[in-house]
Image: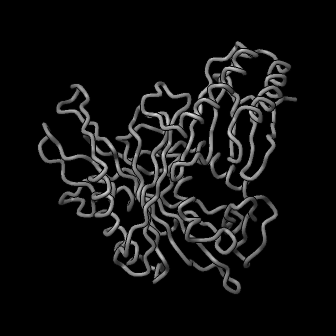
Amino acid sequence: MKRKAKKIAVSAAVLMCTVLLASCGFGGKSSSKNYSTTGSSNGTYQGVIKNGRYRTSKARGVNVSQNDNQYNLKSFESGLTQVSKRVFSTKSYIFQEGQYLSSGTIENWLGRKTKSNPEGLNPAQGKKSNPHPVYIQQIEEQDYMQESGNSMKLRGITIGIGINSEYNYQTKTGGPTLTKKISDSEIRRQGEIAAQKVLQRVRKKSGVGNVPIVIALYKQAPDDSLVGGTFFAYSKNNGNTISSWRKLNYKNVVLPKASAATTNSSDQTDDDSFSNFKSQIQSFFPNLSGVTAQAQYENGTLSGMHITVTTQFYSQSEITSFTQYITRAAKKYLPNGIPIDIKIQSDSEIQAVVYRNAGSDNFQSHIFDSY
């Protein structure tokens, strides 16, 4: 299978940057003539602004095109930031998108190892009838800065490495697509091999010096999954050799579950709560195309939910009434003590959002209106 770079749409990238700046707050503080920061709130990082512009990644949106699950792209980036928070405190460090790994560098690393691309982290194809898998799917760099006098200094780097859980290929053009499943043990092994190489290469980059480098390993979800993958291990390194790995225990699921056969008691309770919520809003407003949730568990405990409600409403008054009802139903039926966001949308646009932040008991809402 040919490898090619996949670029996230410019509009999506601009939107992500806009959201990041909005979440961090405006009215940032100045750090020097050329640098300022966005400011922060609710445990988020401040972002770096240079010469009045937000600093975007030099390798923004590059990944191997073999995996078409867009949830992987989103959960990979957000999950990597959560890993970084374990090492680089939001109170002490300032976030900057990666400036040391270029698009060309990432593309080469994500390629197969060949005579023309000796830096490829993936094995040579081998036999076309039985090719070696493409293991390494995504790489992302995050830089963590601190103000030092009149300048901004690099104080740490986080590198995320995404590893495929399955490999799709064709033995001939136009032929059927075949799939190779990759075991968890092989995912870990390939991730650790790539991590050692990446650490050594990043350490040699000009300007990196001896700052701590965190390497985090991410298991990609299959193409047909309705949730993204999860990070399963990370390592903090002060030299150019991986010191040790720290285990992460995340699980992403879709609610409501199709079957309770593989559900434990904790999952079942959460699934029942969501099913009750879904039943209530569907009985009150029958014009719904679907109600689904992405739920994340950390160490076996529910840590958050993203809920999507797809509507067929035609009037603004219907949307307003429905949003008000969802706000009440969410507080009554959904689990307490975790952050939850509920996106209410039609096929063409987002109509409203209902959300509760971590540590809060009450839901808030916003309806997207028009003048």
Whether residue 317 sits left or right of residue 97 in the image: it is right
Count of labels in the image: 0
Query: Image quarter for residue 23?
Result: bottom right
Query: What residue is shown at x 41% (from left), y 37% (from top)?
Result: 68
Seen as rendered, the residue at the extreme top is 286
Vertical position of residue 290 compared to residue 113: above or below: above
Q: How is the image coloured?
A: one colour
Look at the image and tell me in which quarter the C terminus lies.
top right
Seen as rendered, the residue at the extreme bottom is 149
Query: Image quarter for residue 110?
Result: bottom left
Residue 102 seen from this side:
no
Whether residue 200 sits left or right of residue 300 in the image: it is left
Q: Position of residue 85 (x, y in %)?
A: 59, 65
Query: What residue is shown at x 53% (from left), y 61% (from top)?
Result: 83
Q: Position of residue 318 (x, y in %)?
A: 82, 18
Vertical position of residue 193 compared to residue 326: above or below: below
Look at the image and tell me in which quarter the N terminus lies.
top left
Vertical position of residue 311 compared to residue 107: above or below: above
Q: Position of residue 30 (x, y in %)?
A: 77, 74
Whether residue 126 sits left or right of residue 12 in the image: it is left
Seen as rendered, the residue at the extreme right is 371
Q: Nearer the viewer, residue 299 or 50?
A: 299
Query: What residue is shown at x 40% (from left), y 72% (from top)?
Result: 202
Query: Image quarter for residue 120?
Result: bottom left
Residue 31 seen from this side:
yes
Whether residue 370 sits left or right of residue 176 in the image: it is right
Q: Nearer the viewer, residue 316 or 18?
A: 316
